[in-house]
Amino acid sequence: MGRRDRPRARLLGSSLALALATATATLACGGAAPRAQDEDVPEDIRNPTLTLTLAGGESRALTLAEMAATIAGGPTTLEVDNPAYKRAITYRGYWLADVLAAAGVSLDGAGELIFHCADGYAATLLVDRFAEASPFLAIGQVGEDGELGWEKVRIGKEYLSPAPFYVVGKDPASYAWFGWPLQVTAIEAMGRRSADASANPEGAPEDGEVARGFALFKGSCLACHSRQPTGGSVGPELNTPRNITEYRDRPTLRAFIRDPASFRARSKMPPFPLLGDEDLDAILAYLTYMRGHKRSVDR
């Protein structure tokens, strides 16, 4: 388990994909483009162009300079207590709602946003919780000298740069159910009926523990783990051909999710201290329920 209306255009169909392409020139953003502090960050990651593609095939590419010119007031700053860094950090960027509006994109009819990342991570944010998450598209971290850069963060056993884009929330509490994806390379909006159809706990009461566990699973686990076969590719598949609850007992799973490093040295999976006992029980109730709802997946 692992690692969240501006009606100019309407989403018709099931998806909106936002892909990150390479910019061939230096891009201005309030007078300066993000400066990567990490030498291993490629040039195309330092100077990204955001391309928005609707389900019907229409697309719009936004460079950082175009964002600055199109979005009222240009880039802004957000200081937030970042649980990943365990301290307050100031970011430069744009509210994601303004970025979507600048491209003429509406979330009407969408069920959730999936943030695809360079390392295979795929964070999920329910559109119904978009306002609560207040997602902010960070284009750089503001240093003490006022310049933009990226400081690596430890994710499991690795230290990663958040470049090219880092999506954070205004409220640190959203980190527990959204995950704040870094190295974002694409954003996909799924229709209400199509979103994670293979992972839905069909037949379970909408207001029960299983449904609550599914919501938590999407926010905290689906980013790295697939579930027949929806989800990320960082961690292992959890339901097919054998559900993880079929070969791991509940106490062990609860302890492992809470602190993976206590089981495996340099575990790539991060700890989840913000998930309470009831949250973990709900996630395990969902996984247990899905043992009876398996679908074939290519091995």
Image (spheres, rainbow, N blue to C red):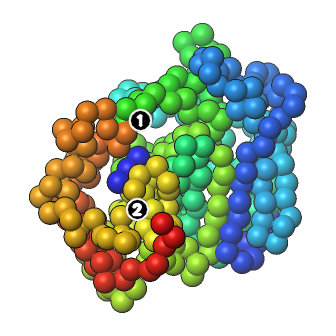
For residue 182, above or below residue 197: above
Could you say which is closer to the camera, residue 247 or residue 227? 247
Quadrant of the frame with the N terminus: bottom left
Snapshot quadrant of residue 293: bottom left
Could you say which is closer to the camera, residue 202 or residue 139? 202
Judged left or right of residue 37, residue 290 is left
Query: In this figure, which residue is indicated by the disc labeled 1?
Result: 155
SS of the residue at dot 1? strand
Q: Amino acid at mark 2?
A: Glu
For residue 152, above or below residue 281: above
Q: Amino acid at mark 1?
A: Ile
**Can the viewer see residue 148?**
no
**Can the viewer see residue 245?**
yes
Disc 1 from disc 2: Cα separation: 20 Å
Judged left or right of residue 272, residue 189 is right
Residue drawn at point x = 31 percent, y = 32 percent = 266
Give percent across and percent down for residue 142. 58, 22
Residue drawn at point x = 30 percent, y = 70 percent = 243
Query: In this figure, which residue is indicated by the disc labeled 2?
Result: 237
For residue 167, above or below residue 162: below
Residue drawn at point x = 58 percent, y = 46 percent = 117
**Residue reaching furthest front?**
299
Could you say which is closer to the camera, residue 272 or residue 172? 272
Label 2 crowd (10 A; few <14 / some 14-19 / many >=20):
many
Give percent across and percent down for residue 44. 75, 31
Label 1 crowd (10 A; few <14 / some 14-19 / many >=20):
some
Mark earlier in primary sequence (1, 2): 1
SS of the residue at dot 2? loop
Residue drawn at point x = 34 percent, y = 41 percent = 270
Question: Pointer 1 and pointer 2: residues touching (CB < 8 Å)?
Answer: no
Snapshot quadrant of residue 295: bottom left
